[in-house]
Amino acid sequence: MRRLALNEQRDPRGAPPPAATWLLARFGCGPAIESLAGDLVEEFHHGRSRAWYWRQTLAGIATSFAEDVIRHRLIVLQAILTGWTALFLFGWLLGDPMFEWLDTLAAARPMMPRVYPPMVVGSVGYVMCGWMIARLYRSHRAAAVIAFLACALVLQLPRLCDLVVDALGHPRYLPYLSGHLAGMILTIVSVLFGGFGLPCGRASKKIVEAD
C-alpha cells in the first residue's frame, strides 16, 4: 500500500489539496520536485494546514523554476528563440490564409457569433508554440514553456501601460484596455494549453509516493 494511503487512514483530513498537488506535478521544474512533493505530503499529515500546503506548493514551483532557468539558461534561451521563430513562421505562412478564412466564414454565416480574427489567429499560434517548445525541450518542459510565456507577456506590458494611462485620462479607451487584457489572458491560456495540455511525445511526470 502506498504511503499516501496509509497517511490518509491515520489523518481524518484525508489527502492534501489535490489542486495544489496537481499544480506542483505539472509546473514544478527539475528532478527534485517528486522529493519535495513527498516532503510536503508528510508535513501536511503531521498537522500542517491547507494554507501552508498551498504556500509551500507555490513557493516550490517558483523556486524550482528559477533554479532550472539559472542552471540551464542556454537551453531556456534556445527554447524562447524557438518559440518566437515558430510564431513568426506561423504568422508568415498561415496567418493571412486564416484571416481570409475567418472573414469568408463570417460573411457566409452572418448569424454566427462574431470573433476577433487577430485573437483567434494569435491563440492558435501560441498553442502551436507552446506545444513545439514542450516537445523539443521535454527534459526542461516546465521551465522552457513558462519562460517563453513570461517573455510574451513582458513584450505586451508596454502597450498595457499605455492603455491604462489613456483609460485613466478618457473612458473611451476602456474597450481597448479590456481587449488588450483579454488578449493577454488568451496568451496565457493558449501557451499553457499547448505546453501542458497537449501530448508532447512523453507522459508527464506524476507524483507518486513510494511504499
Image (cartoon, rainbow, N blue to C red):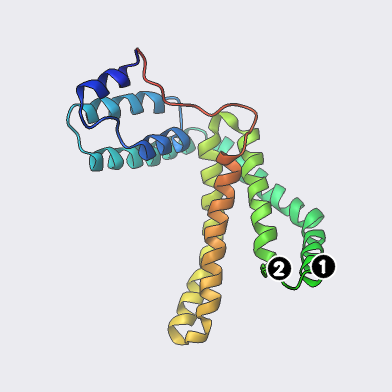
Left or right relative to 183: residue 118: right
Instruction: Measuring from the top left, give residue 91's x and y in whole percent.
Output: 75, 57
Q: Can residue 68 be seen in this view?
A: yes
Indicate which disc residue 112 carries.
Answer: 2
- Residue matched to label 1: 104
Q: Evaluate if marks 1 and 2 touch, with contact meaning CB atoms under 8 Å apart.
A: no
Indicate which disc residue 210 carries.
Answer: none
Left or right relative to 132: residue 89: right
Q: Looking at the image, which residue is at 64% across and 56% down? A: 123
Q: What is the C-alpha distance between the residues marked 1 and 2?
A: 12 Å
Instruction: Measuring from the top left, give residue 16's x and y in whole percent.
Output: 29, 33
Left or right relative to 54: residue 24: right
Going from N to C along the chain, the mark reached first, 1 or 2, is 1
Quadrant housing the N terminus: top left
Left or right relative to 144: residue 26: left
Quadrant housing the C terminus: top left
Up-down: is 84 above or below 99?
A: above
Callout 2: helix, strand or loop? Answer: loop
Circle 1 residues within 10 Å: few <14, some 14–19, many ≥20: few
Instruction: Measuring from the top left, give residue 79's x and y in whole percent.
Output: 61, 41
Circle 2 residues within 10 Å: few <14, some 14–19, many ≥20: few
Up-down: is 182 above or below 187?
A: below
